[in-house]
Amino acid sequence: MPNTASKDRPRSAKPACASAVDMIELVLPNDTNQLGNLLGGRLMHWVDIAAALSAQRHSNRISVTASMDEMSFLGPVKLGQVVHLRACVNHAFRTSMEVGVHVDVEDFKTGDTRHVSTAYLTFVALDEFGHGIAVPEVIPESEDEKRRYEAANARREQRLRRREEFAELERLRQERAKQA
Ligand SMILES: CC(C)(COP(=O)(O)OP(=O)(O)OC[C@H]1O[C@@H](n2cnc3c(N)ncnc32)[C@H](O)[C@@H]1OP(=O)(O)O)[C@@H](O)C(=O)NCCC(=O)NCCS
């Protein structure tokens, strides 16, 4: 099916805070490893869900994960603790959006809160034919939103550079496979 011109539709603009998502998860036995610590993959799954909800709230479209930047786990999260994920669209480009997800863990017995991870994901909004569609611009309002908006520009450049490098490696791999 030919691609539509939907990528070039005029875009409206929405405040960054309109895409804010707050998600809470309780760490249950099935989420943990043999040490009773939350599995990294489970946290990545929750991060992906929170980010998808935020991207979809911003674009009002089904949005798919194009990439997730490197993610570090700053400390263990134990069985029975509460994970608090806050997601927001930092910047919208043409069809893609950078979503930042801040993850804290809360010990409900003491009320202590600890930052355990931050992740940046890129989502692409799709139209009804599965093609990328232009998304509303983001209006950063608070000082934090403005800082994240600017930082997202630099991260996007790095991602696009990495994407080109991967494409070049893949091209070389295919060439070598043909010669073998
Ligand atoms: C994401 C996807 C829609 C991009 O499609 P594509 O044909 O490569 O699209 P384009 O080259 O036109 O890029 C579309 C946008 O995505 C961005 N993009 C694509 N790959 C990216 C990556 N790895 N990292 C960051 N941004 C990326 C482009 O910069 C572009 O942004 P812009 O329109 O805002 O300028 C496509 O690769 C896809 O469907 N991937 C699978 C998604 C999925 O199923 N995810 C769940 C995990 S399997």
Image (cartoon, helix red, strand yellow):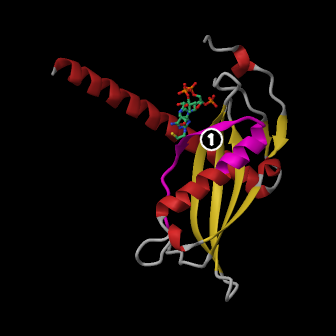
Give x and y (percent) for residue 68: 53, 47
Give x and y (percent) for residue 164: 44, 30
Residue furthest to the bottom: 110
Decide: is 120 above or below 56. Answer: below
Residue found at x 56% / y 55%? 45
Residue at mark 1: 153
Identify which residue, 1 or 116, lies in the foreground.
Answer: 1
**Quadrant of image for the C terminus:** top left
Identify which residue, 155 or 63, lies in the foreground.
Answer: 63
Residue found at x 33% / y 24%? 171
Decide whether residue 131 is among the magenta residues: no
Q: Which residues are magenta?
A: 51-73
Decide whether residue 64 is among the magenta residues: yes
Residue found at x 77% / y 42%? 58
Left/right placement of residue 9 relative to residue 168 reads right
Left/right placement of residue 63 relative to residue 44 reads right
Residue type at mark 1 is Asn
- Quadrant of ligand 1 in image: top right
Decide: is 2 above or below 38. Answer: above
Identify which residue, 163 or 104, lies in the foreground.
Answer: 104
